[in-house]
Amino acid sequence: MKIDPNHLQMLAAIIDAGGLGEGALALNKSQPSVSRSVAMLEQRLGSRLFEKGKRPLRPTELCKTLADQGRIIAAANVAAETAVALYSGGKAGTARVAGTPIFMDGVIASMMASFQNAFPDVAIHQSYGYFDELSEQLALGSIDLAICPVRPNEVPAHLNFRPILRGRNVLACAPSHPLARRSAVKLEDIAAYPWIAPPAGSPLYADLKAALASIGISDFRVSFTGGSLASIFSVMAGSDSLTVLPYSVVFMQRAAKTITALPVRLEHPERELGLLWHIDRPMRPAVRRFQRFLEAEFKGLARRIDERGREDVWRR
Amino acid sequence: MKIDPNHLQMLAAIIDAGGLGEGALALNKSQPSVSRSVAMLEQRLGSRLFEKGKRPLRPTELCKTLADQGRIIAAANVAAETAVALYSGGKAGTARVAGTPIFMDGVIASMMASFQNAFPDVAIHQSYGYFDELSEQLALGSIDLAICPVRPNEVPAHLNFRPILRGRNVLACAPSHPLARRSAVKLEDIAAYPWIAPPAGSPLYADLKAALASIGISDFRVSFTGGSLASIFSVMAGSDSLTVLPYSVVFMQRAAKTITALPVRLEHPERELGLLWHIDRPMRPAVRRFQRFLEAEFKGLARRIDERGREDVWRR
DNA sequence: CTATTTTCATAACTTTGTGTTATATTAACT
DNA sequence: AGTTAATATAACACAAAGTTATGAAAATAG
């Protein structure tokens, strides 16, 4: 005997509401509709569900048993409905994001933290990668969003790009560095120190070379190469090395006092930090929400950088 | 967003079966039907449930969440279906039965025990009563079945009656009674002992009087009056009292050796033990099954009584 | 890379169930 | 007994799900 779960819910509603009419009201249906459905169900089951000739409809033993299942079904149903609501509102789900290590660790990580704080049911799957890999992963659909410095005129056709921060690099060192206290830094001073470099393939490495070239340094000694911001911080804290970092990364660390920028103006890279996503793959609500969140965060960050940047670092 | 629980079950079936086609098979539906239902649901929800362009249909995150609820619903559904099957098969439910105390305790109780052994999910609500009350309770619908000695030509119009045992009464006493060992008992012997009588209103009391009158005893001393068989047994065990009991009751006690019949032939009452039920109230399956069970038990009992009766008691 | 197989989607139509309003029936109540 | 409240029935509209036949596209094999 195949039973429609809707009917079981209906029985529960009738019993719980205390009558057919009120049950129909609770179900947002008309009374005749419910009446007929009950009659059909009784016919199909071959058993009474409500006692005959009782006017506030009194449920049979069997009816109560079935209604118990109906309540379970109703509960599962509202669970499903709230799941859909959460999902559609972007308050539940998964966002798979990837980006260049330095930005992810130095800037995005803390934003992800506050996002997770606000939307604990959104799972963020984060990974690292550089432009080419990210582009491919977006094409394959294995990630939803990439965060990466991009030359705006080099965005592949299959990707959307939204810039979120102008590219600005600074010379960075530990706050304990001999040059950190100076109000002016000369080339000769810089040349004396070893360099920490991002991995050779990274855009930041190109930036490093270009930046140093722009201030006349073409020959430099690399003492450490590493992909992670944490390793850069560690090495820098224990040595007098210098490096080139996005100003946003240095800015985000200002409270932690783990790093500082030297008053040397570097050439801006032609890339802009931005969000990349597949051009015609519909974005899941959670991803969309995370993207909006990042954009808002970066808007705030850019403003604060501008305000602070005026009297700071490369303006000096 | 209102969701049809059937759709949730469908999602679970598709995922568990590993594809839309196999899911449709599992649901006993055609593949196009399921395909379209999924499409409509996706439309309504505004979210993909299966990844686009993947041929063994691969469920989305949301889909898996919903399918979890679908499995809960499916489980509740099969629970409901088995509940109906049990109920309809008379293997679950409630049977409200009532009858005269002596028969209920002396004969029916052990039958109810073996019935409950065979059908543990049928709850039997037993109560006591004499004909008039039973008749009224049947009319009111507060009991389903009555077991009671009845004059077959006095059955009320609103009741069905099915005889299950001819009425035969015997003189009964404790096995330790002085008369118990005698092969023949004379009236003078009997007259010397006190009597245990059923309650004055009971049919058995009338039987007692009639039976004694039939053997010439019109004046007798009642030492104890009680409604329950247990009390009769107790009193009898501690005294030399006599009483009149249905032979079936004495027969059922033969193994327990709590009571024995005296070799005195009494007049048979004009009543027959039988089942009574309301004439046009549809009988619930559990009640029907219990009734059938009782009828079968009594058929066996009557046969055994006949076999044994030939060389026993009133044939002597 | 093309051909074949699998798997799913679409079309067209039928059937079933549910929704509606209007109205009849009947239990419960004063 | 008459009134009221609750449920059942009738008649019709419509949405959804069932069907078979067929088309499209992904996966697989040669």
Image: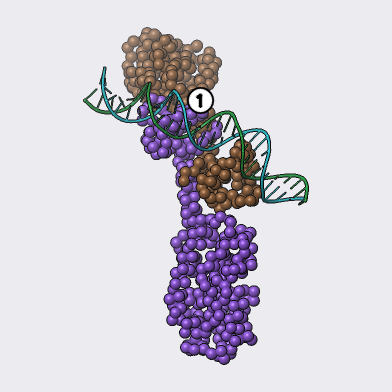
Chain colours: A brown, B purple, C cyan, D green
Q: Position of residue B82 (x, y in %)?
A: 46, 49
Residue extending furthest toward the front: B153
Give above or below for B130 relative to C20. below
User: Quick one: B166 or C19, which is closer to the camera?
Assistant: B166
Q: Which quadrant of the structure image shows residue D29?
A: top left
Q: Position of residue B74 (x, y in %)?
A: 46, 42
Write the residue at 47% across / 54% down.
B89
Query: On the rendered image, what quadrant is the N terminus of chain B found in?
Result: top right
Q: Which quadrant of the structure image shows residue B199?
A: bottom right
Write the residue at 60% across / 86% down.
B217
Q: Which residue is tagged 1?
A: A289
Chain ID of residue with mark 1: A
Q: Position of residue B184 (x, y in %)?
A: 49, 89
Q: Position of residue A249 (x, y in %)?
A: 45, 21
In this view of the protein, can residue A260 be seen by the observer?
no
Q: Secondary structure at mark 1?
A: helix
User: Quick one: A148 or B133, which is closer to the camera?
Assistant: B133
User: Quick one: A106 or A241, which is closer to the camera?
Assistant: A106
Give above or below for C11 relative to B262. above
Give above or below for B254 relative to B93. below
Please rate how many residues cluster around mark 1, counting C-alpha atoms within 10 Å: few if below 14, some from 14 to 19, many from 20.
many
Give above or below for A155 relative to B127. above
In this view of the protein, can residue B290 be seen by the observer?
yes
Image side of residue A31 versus residue B76, left or right: right
Write the residue at 52% across / 72% down.
B166
Q: Which quadrant of the structure image shows residue A126?
A: top left
Write the residue at 56% across / 75% down.
B229
